[in-house]
Structure formats: C-alpha cells, structure tokens
Image: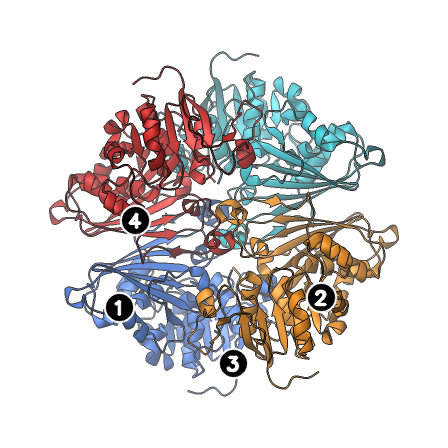
Chain colours: A red, B orange, C blue, D cyan
C-alpha cells in the first residue's frame, strides 16, 4: 500500500488533550493533510480559537465541523480521540468506505470482550471488527501494523510498562508472576474534563496514589500485552498508578525478580540490543536516571536498567501525550503508509 | 459587649476554600466554639471526610448539617462563606435573633446598590441592612467594626490595594486620578469550582491577565474603599488582575504619581509610622521585595515602598485566603468580641 | 525529670530547611524558650532578616550568634540542624554540662560505626556516646526517648517506611525478605544548597528516580530500624527514592508479600489498632488514598492499607520537614520533658 | 550574500539555557550545520550527555570542544550564548576571518558605552565594532539585519516591551513620558546558575518583584529601543520585572496614556495592520488575554490591546528562550542568509 501524494486524515473529537496533540503533530507532518476534524461542541469554530497555540499567519485554515455522515469520505485514515465507545459505533461505516482507523481510546485494545465490559462498563458492539484490530505498539507489532485496517492504540501506562519489560520477558529472565509496576503520571493523563480533583489548587504541590482500591483500567491491558510479549506464559503484574504535580510525563518504576538461572545475565546489553534499531526507544548508559522532562513533547522513550541482587529495577519515561498517545498514533500512521517511521516525529524535547 | 465564655460561631457553606480556611483557623482559636457548619451537598458528612487535613484523634467532632431555620440559634456570630446573594437572604432572620454576621462574599461590600446590581447581576434585597453594614477592613475601620452587627468583609484584591495606598492617600501625596494596580493572584482565588480553565493542566506553568476586557468586580469595591480612605476626594484607579501558577497568595504592584508638592516626602517613614501599631501589616526595610511565600498561611501583609523619580511603586503581599478572606474575618471577630486582635491568628507562614 | 518553668532550647545551624522549620515550631511552642541559635554565615543577623516569614511586631527578638563555646550553657536541650558530622564533635562538651541533645542529622542514627563510615564517608568520632543514643521514633521508642540524653532523629524516608511497616512486621504477617519501598519526596528534602539539579528550571514539571545506582543513605537506616521493629528477624528491603516536583511531602508506596499463614488477617483492623492511641499517626478508612497536601505543615502521618491477592500495598504520607524532621524533634522534646506530646504540634495542614 | 549549501554555524558556550535552546533549534534547522560548540567545563563531552533531550539514534554526533583559536574557522556565523563580556573579546578575531556574529548577551546592545559600563560593570573593549553592530529585532530592523556583520540580540524583556509599544509609539498616539511596563518572567530567565534564590523550594509557589530598588539592566536597553522606534522623541518608561513560578515565558503588561488628540484612534486596527505581514507576531482578537503557555517553545509573540478611557493596556507574551533569545537569533540568521524567515522556527507551542 503506497501513498504517492499526501495522506488524507480525519480526526474525531479534537478538543481533548490527545486531540490537540494530534493536531500539533499532524499539522507539521510533511506527508499529511488534515481533511476534517469534528467536534459537537465546537463545530464552526476555528481550531486556533480553541487552541491559540495553533495561531499563525500561514495557511492553517482548519475549522471544527459537526460529525455528519460523510465528513470523512475522502480520508485515508481517521483518528478517534474520543471517549471510550465512540470508535466502536462508527468503525463499521468507515471500514466499508475503505478508511482505516486509529483509535486512541480503549475500544480496540482488549481482545476479551468480557474483560472489556467489566472494566469499561459497556458491551462491545463490534467484536468482529475487534478481532481484526491490531494493538498499535510498533516496537512489538510493527509487521501487523503495516497492513492493519483498525489500530487499537495502547494506553499511556501500558506503553511504558510493556516496553520496559519486553526485553526480559522475551528472554525469560525474570519471574513473571511477581511483577510490580509503580507508575507515576502527570495530570494531563486525566484529560480535559472539569473535575474538582484536577483543579490546580487541588492537584499541585501534592502527590497521591489512585485507583489502588478498585484497580485501573490499564491493568488488564498491561496484563494482556505482557502475556503476548512473553508468548502466553503465565504473567501477573500489579500496576499501581500515582498522580504527579506536573503536566506531562509518565515515569514507570518496574520491579522484577531475576530467575536463579539468569543471575549472570548482562541486562544492560540485553536492553541495548533489544532496542538497538528502534528510532524512539533509547536505553540510557548504565547507572542513569531518566527524567520525564527529557522526553517532554517528543516521541522518545528513555529506559534505564538497575540491579540490586536478584531485583531488577527498570526505569522508563515517556511523554504520555506523545509516545503514550498521539505520537504513537502518528508512528502507526507512518508504518501503515510506508513512510519513514520518524516522519513528523522528530521533535526534540523542550528543556528546560 | 464582653464575652466571658467561648464565642459560639456558625458557618454557612463550609465546602469552598474560604470555608475550609475558616475551619482551619476557628478550630484552633482558643475562644471560639464552632456550633454548626452547613452545606447542602455534604450534609451528614464529617468535616474531616471532606477535608482530610482536619483528621485528628482528638475531640474534633464536626459534621456538616443542612441549612435549616434554627441551626444557628445559639450562635453569637455567623460567617457566610457562600456565593454572592446568600447572605442577603438570611441576614434579616439572623439579626432578629441578635446574631451578628460576617459575610465573606460581596453582599455587604458595596454601598451603592446600583453599582452592586451592575457588577453582580442581581438586585440587592436588603438595602436597609446594607446601610448599617460595616466594611471589615480593621486597619481602616477598627472602631466601627467593634460594634458592627453586619460585616461586609473586603475582597482579597481590595484588601491588598487599599492597605497599600492608604498611607499616601490619607496624606494626600500622590495623584489620585492616575493610580494603577497591577495585581497577581494564586489560583485558589478562583474558588473550588470545576472549571476547565482552572485545571492544573491549563493553569500551571503559564501566566495571563484576565477580566481586562470587562473589568473585575473588585474594581468598584477598590474605588469605593479608596474614596473613603481619601476622605471622598476624587479617585480613579485602574485595577488589572493576573493569574499566577501558584495556589495561594496575592501580589499587588501599585503605581502612583507623586504630587509636585510631595517630592520631598519620606515615604518609607510615612508607611512605617502609619502601620507601626498594626499587628499584621509589616512595612519591610527600604529596598525590599516582598514574596507571597513569606505570608503563606499567615494573616500577615508585607509592604515595600520604592520610588523612581516621581513614580511611587508600592509592593504588597498577602495570603488571599487569610488576610484576604478568612483570617481577616477572624480578625474582625476578635475585634467585635473584645478579644486580643491576634488571637488564633498567630500562624507563622509556611516556608519553604 | 520535670520542668516547671520553660524549657531552654538552643539550635545549632538554623539556616537550612530543618533549622527554619524548628524555628517555626519552637517559636510558637508554649513551653519553650529559644535561648540561642548559631550560624557561622549569618552571625549578627536577625532571624527575620534571613526568614521573613518570622517577621512580626511582637516580641520575637532572636539573632543568629557565632558558635562559641558557652553559647548554650543555660540550655536544657540543644538541637543540631547541621550537616552530618557536626553533632559528633560537640556532643561530649554539651553532655558534660548536662545538656541533652537532639540531632536531626545522621550522627546518632546508625549503631554500626562501620556502616556509618561506609555510607557517610567519615569515621564516627564518639562511639561511646552513640551507644547511649536513642533512635527518636516515638511510636516505636517512646519509653527510651523519655530518659534519653542523646536522640538520633530518624531520617524523613525512614520515618515513613518504618511506621508504614511496623504493624505487619511486629505481627509477622509478611515476608520480611522481599520488601520494596518505592518512595517519593518533595524537593525540600534536598536541603537549602545551591545546586543546579535543584534549580526550579531543572526540577519542576519533571519526575525522576535517584540514587538507584549507588543506593541512598537511608537504606541502611531503614534496614536497621525494620530489624529492630521485627525483633531482629531477618529483613531485607529495597528502598528506591524519587523526586517529586513539589516543595514538601513524602509519599511511600510499600509492597509486602503476605505470608501463606496470614491470608485471613484483617489488615485494616491491625493497623487501626496498632496506632489507635497515637496522636499523630492516622489510619485512613479502607480504600483511601492519602495525599501529601493533607499533612503539609503538620506533624501528622496518614496511612492507608490496600490488598491485592497476596500483595499488601501500604501508602504513607508525611511532611518531610515536620514528622520527617523538625516536628518529630519537637515531639521527642515533649516526651523528654514530660510535656503533653502534642504541645506546639497542633498545626492543621495548610489546604489548599 | 547567498548561501547555496548549508550555513556552517558555531556556538560559543552552549551549556546554559539559551545555548541549549539554540541547539534544539539549530539541530532541526534544514539549512544549518553546527560545526562546533565550545565549553570550557564540558569539553570532550557529547552534547546528549549534558542535555539528554538531544539523545537520538540518528546521526547527531556533536561534542563540546575547548574554545581554541581556530575552532570556528570554517563557520559562516558564530553565536555567543555566553555571559556578558565574552563576545567583545573574540569579535575582532572572528570578523577578520569574515565570520559573522550573533551575540545573545548584552555586549552589542547598548550604543552608549558609558551606559554599558554603568549597568554591566565593565568597560566596553571594542566600541568600533559596537558602532557597526545591528540591534537584532527583525520586526523593527529587518533591513539592517540583512547585511549585518555583528548582531546584538535584544534581551527577553526588551523584545516584548518594544514590540508591544512599537505601533503606538510610531503613530505617536500615546504619552511617551509616562510609560509603565509591568513585566513577569519565568525562572529560566535567571539562567542555569546554582543560586539559592532560584532553587525550586525557594522560587516555586511564590511570586515577587525584583530589581525594583536598583533597576534592571534591561531598563536602558528598552529606553534606547523605544527612542529609536519613536524616532528619537523623548521617551521615559518605568520597567518593573517580576518572577513567576513557571519555567518559560514572559508576560508584559504595558500601560500607556492615550494623547488627547488620539482619543478616536482604533488601536485594534492599528496593531493588526502594523503586524499584518509579520510571521511571528500575532495580534489577538479584541478582548483577548494572551497566555504564556500558548507560545511555549515557539517563536511566536501574542499581543492583545485593551483600553480603559485614556489608558491603553497592552498585553504581550513570548517564550523568553525562543522569541526572547535563541529563536530570535535564528530568525536573524535566516534574514542574514536570505533564507525563508520562518525556516526552522515553525514549532507549534507545547500545550498543555
């Protein structure tokens, strides 16, 4: 599937943080043309009115439109940056028009529809489409992504935890049943919804864990992903999310017990080799401490591997809105369209 | 009016930031007993459930109650920490029961009911009570506060601007018609309301002015207060508020043109003498730059006076929730009840 | 040992964050009089000049003095808020004058002088005094603290981790050899030293782990404390600290594997009963998520206990400068002087 | 002067914030090749070791070198991102080799060497070079920049204040003698120097003015720039800087009195027309409040114009490290090299 001219792209629901991040990335993408962006609440409004960071004197002339039936008809790919449940409803119509789908929500992540229903409190309405959906984690599923018609893009936490554990799980060097992922996220992960808990006066200058009582929706997704990576060996991970008083960024601190037979493994080399060809995943030198600010605004992931006796401590950082969402979506688009995988994703993190 | 035993206090609407700050101060006040605190939404809930900073193993046994008719019957003083308009409705009933009122909202601040209606978009329903209300700025109105039955507590910005200008306006040393107050506030000033604009991901790591187009409700209040202070000479001030990415604190930068006849005045001495007996207003040494953190959590105000040729630059800081709201309310209570004015207000600012 | 009149207190090195926090607490303590505070760099300077939050119009008249020989002669207790190594040098002289010592640094924490030398890169110069030193964790060592002549005050992280684990280690319900403490601290824990890493432009809006490569000095202290609590059973814990972009606060997320024989234990009750009589340690209701802001500026610790199958997840928050340092020091002073343990420590956390 | 192939660029002193920002911009610039970057302290170190945001798997192979004599010999342009005084020393040597200079420090900003000496506490050592230096504010000096051999790049505050006032000063519509610029800057403006005042625990969650007593070095530069813009009419401005607890961004609130004869002017149109052809300066719609976050990481400036009676209130935001420093430098480079002025500067601000 080659694209000689520009890729025509549509966005459903562009007024949240992943939607506006998609805009930031796609507007600057040399091979993409945004054909339509829909929003019920902002229809008729210029995108730069809602997101003044998009103001410029150049050509950008993009206005939110209402989500009518044919709005995406001349698109090659449509992104869903919507709440869970929206992509499920519209997928069939789009696919019939030969439009490929990249869903940033959870509709096409979990293959088990019972698990989906349990965690997302809604029935899955198109299990037949779900079956052909590809989990959009390029470092693991690159080949399948190439020809995918529907991509279920990984959640922000699952991206960090899976790529943090992939090398040792594939190599079978750690106990897969006692994994712990102590994860920390900036507040943009909570979305652009008016909630008292996420007011600056409530969330800044403080730190807390959350969802420890009922579990977080990313738990089953991480579980599923790690099983796939480990070739369906038995895996159990406890995933505990925390809220950091910062805007962007995820830091995963992952604990894994080294198996007795793996005590002599060189984990630094293992990680470096595993990711040697990856354009976005960077294994830092021995002894490093990755910082979320060093990937802020970029599609990069930094990983450091530490060891204490039989405990492996893996530190992973990413920008939750880029490698953890919109950037990974664009990476998938590039793969799906036979473009250079880094095209439009070469941003250097904004430091300081 | 002497109080031998404890002062019985009621609070209407204790679930916002000024309400919770009143709780913090009054719970620790040695001469106050909180008899009732009302909230429609949280009725039946222990205050420490809503505000876990109030958890302790001691005696605190305070539960939100619904705002029924007789709930404050044995109170000496009732605070209103409510939206504008609530105190107006209930004032008459309370006053008839000989209960004194301290309103933290705007119902009893503006003496001109037309101005009130214009800025607050509601008619004033008890102008007869408004007439007897005292503007609760102790440094200016201490004597009237003593015997007041109704206190209209100043807004946070007006407290800073009026006390910043009082010495020079009283002395008639600056041009009263070209005053500018460039003010900056932390986000708790916006209240505990779920609004997208005040989400941490929107408000942190950024700075903006606001209400420059339509004006801010504190503009007429400042105007009225300065006229009173200047003994009804003609005064015009332009007040421009800004939002600072911090939780608490107000910083006012006030610009005043020194009158030709006042070029030889010693402004540092003037300010020091004006506030020499004040327990909460501290004039910093010549050349100082007050910082909001140095008054965070305390009822203190720090003022510095700078001069450049004929321009006087007055820097004022306060905690908007303490000296700018709840603390000033307690200060008024102390005055009204013949207590030591600093009682329950001796907190040292939390640094760092 | 009774004190009828005021306790005379001295402070060595009052210009760091623990020193200034001691000042905040002790100035307001009803039974304490600060007799002298030393600083080489600030000698001659009024404390309010260095810490403008201490400005008031009242009596506070406290000036830094140079650390000469007899400066503390009429003190009952001297606090060291100094770098490691200073208290060791001066302890003998003070003790001979019957002055009791509370050291906020590490000189009297580790009983094994080899371990001390290894982690703090200096020889211990008074092992004979170390032997009689008491580890100042009141909830564990209250009786010994009463008569102690020298207190080695726990570090901030060790306070959180030990009190978080004490109930289950005492009861022997978890595997003591696979403990993990994933801890997060605000930046005031790094002290008031000019370092590029701790500039606001480097540390804000970011998150990182640190000292994972070489280990953190609190590791051996936690290890020692947990062994004592567990009555010298074999204990191994991995302690991983992280830096949170906030000023105050520690959040410990502690992972412990429940022993097979303890699967039916009621951990919520266990924790509630263990701390039922403690004035500062509060076990939150089942399902809670403690937030550091709810203890900011107070001596409180909040603990929540969660369980997932055989994994116990204990969440602990404290203010690193209060319960993690100065406040715990004052708590020890109260115990040592037969005062009410909460005296001068009744601050309600500053929220928001 | 045309450049067919890549522009060869050198950077002196690349370890501060303006240096690292130059790297971020120039590495991604399609027509620039960085030939050498010097640093005494980091010589021999890969740039990505010092700034891990520059890590990638691609070609970037850039190492700090010691500042030896011939290191820039094959450069077309050399940037100085150094402390004041360094560019002065090296300018002559470079110019003799036909290398053009863009100085981000103050050496070539102030044409009056007495004023320079007074504010920067050093003699100017090359007044003959200063005379030919061009002040690098493209919107005002574009033509001169084209052929400049030495650019003195404006300070961050002066860029905001001059562009904020240019339209009304050129048109002669406001009183030039009573201008006030109340400016607010994020902390990256203070540079990457280890100072206690700029520690996160000192600077976050607080707000203060600074340099009000002695004046700020940008005062004479603003003064000079405004006189030039106003065609040497008499101008007096009072510039008052403040520190905002954020990392990047400047917000200028500028107050100007409208002249009696200009009362009927349409200021919104005036501003829109003045900047209509500018690629980076955007006049927001009537009634807007620019936010610093909307230009974070971009070279854009947003301006809003408000009016209250005879007071004009101009709100200006920019990123102090981009349009206020490195970005403006690249904009000058583009002009000097006949490149498209926006080349390498098309970054969309990072929101949220």
Badges 4 and 1, same chain: no
Element carrying mark 2 = loop
Q: State whether residue D217 is above or below residue C30.
A: above
Residue for point 42% across, 60% down: C292
Q: Please give the chain letter of the residue carrying mark 2.
A: B
Where residue A306 appears, x then y in whole percent? 26, 46
Question: Which label was assigned to residue C240?
Answer: none
Q: How far apart are labels 4 and 1 at the CA level?
A: 26 Å
Residue D45 seen in the current view: no
Query: Picture quarter containing residue D176?
Result: top right
Whether residues under marks 3 and 1 lie with C-beta atoms below 8 angstroms apart, the answer is: no
Give x and y (percent) for residue D341: 56, 21
Q: Which residue corresponds to mark 3?
A: C31
> Which numbered disc, 3 or 1, marks the residue that appears first in the sequence?
3
Q: Position of residue D146 (x, y in %)?
A: 62, 18
Report in which chain the residue with disc 1 lies: C
Dot in front, 4 or 1: 4
Q: Residue furthest left?
A: A261
Q: Nearest the camera: A115 or D27? A: A115
- Give the mark toward the camera: 4 or 3: 4
Q: Is residue B201 above or below residue B52?
A: above
User: Which-is-in-front pick, marks 3 and 1?
Assistant: 1
Q: Which is in the foreground here, disc 2 or disc 4?
A: 4
Q: Find disc 4 in the rendering and name its residue.
A: A119
Residue identifier under label 2:
B137
Evaluate whether label 2 is on the same chain as label 4. no
What distance separates the C-alpha of mark 4 from that of mark 3? 56 Å
Residue of label 1: C267
């Amino acid at each position: 599937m080659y694209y000689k001219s520009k890729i025509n792209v549509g966005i459903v629901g562009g007024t949240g943080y992943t939607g506006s991040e998609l805009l930031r990335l796609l507007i600057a993408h040399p091979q993409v043309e945004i054909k339509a962006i829909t929003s019920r609440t902002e229809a008729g409004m210029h995108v730069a009115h809602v997101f003044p960071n998009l103001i410029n004197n150049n050509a950008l002339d993009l206005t939110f439109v209402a989500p009518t039936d044919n709005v995406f008809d001349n698109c090659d790919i449509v992104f869903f940056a919507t709440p869970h449940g929206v992509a499920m409803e519209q997928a069939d119509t789009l696919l019939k028009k030969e439009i490929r789908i990249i869903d940033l929500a959870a509709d096409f992540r979990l293959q088990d529809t019972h698990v989906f229903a349990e965690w997302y409190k809604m029935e899955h309405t198109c299990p037949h489409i779900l079956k052909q959906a590809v989990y959009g984690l390029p470092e693991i599923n690159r080949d399948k992504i190439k020809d995918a018609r529907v991509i279920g893009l990984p959640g922000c936490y699952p991206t960090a935890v899976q790529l943090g554990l992939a090398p040792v799980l594939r190599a079978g060097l750690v106990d897969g049943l006692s994994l712990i992922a102590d994860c920390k996220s900036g507040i943009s992960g909570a979305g652009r919804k008016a909630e008292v808990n996420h007011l600056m006066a409530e969330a800044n200058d403080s730190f807390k864990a959350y969802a420890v009582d009922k579990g977080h929706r990313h738990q089953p997704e991480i579980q599923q992903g790690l099983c796939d990576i480990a070739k369906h060996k038995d895996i159990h991970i406890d995933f505990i999310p925390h809220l950091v008083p910062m805007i962007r960024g995820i830091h995963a601190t992952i604990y894994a017990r080294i198996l007795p037979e793996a005590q002599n493994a060189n984990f630094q080399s293992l990680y470096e080799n595993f990711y040697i060809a990856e354009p976005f995943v960077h294994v830092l030198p021995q002894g490093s401490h990755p910082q979320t600010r060093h990937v802020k605004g970029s599609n990069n992931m930094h990983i450091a591997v530490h060891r204490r006796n039989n405990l492996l401590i893996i530190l992973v950082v990413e920008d939750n809105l880029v490698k953890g969402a919109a950037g990974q979506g664009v990476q998938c688009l590039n793969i799906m369209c036979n473009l250079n995988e880094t095209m439009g994703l070469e941003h250097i993190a904004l430091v300081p």
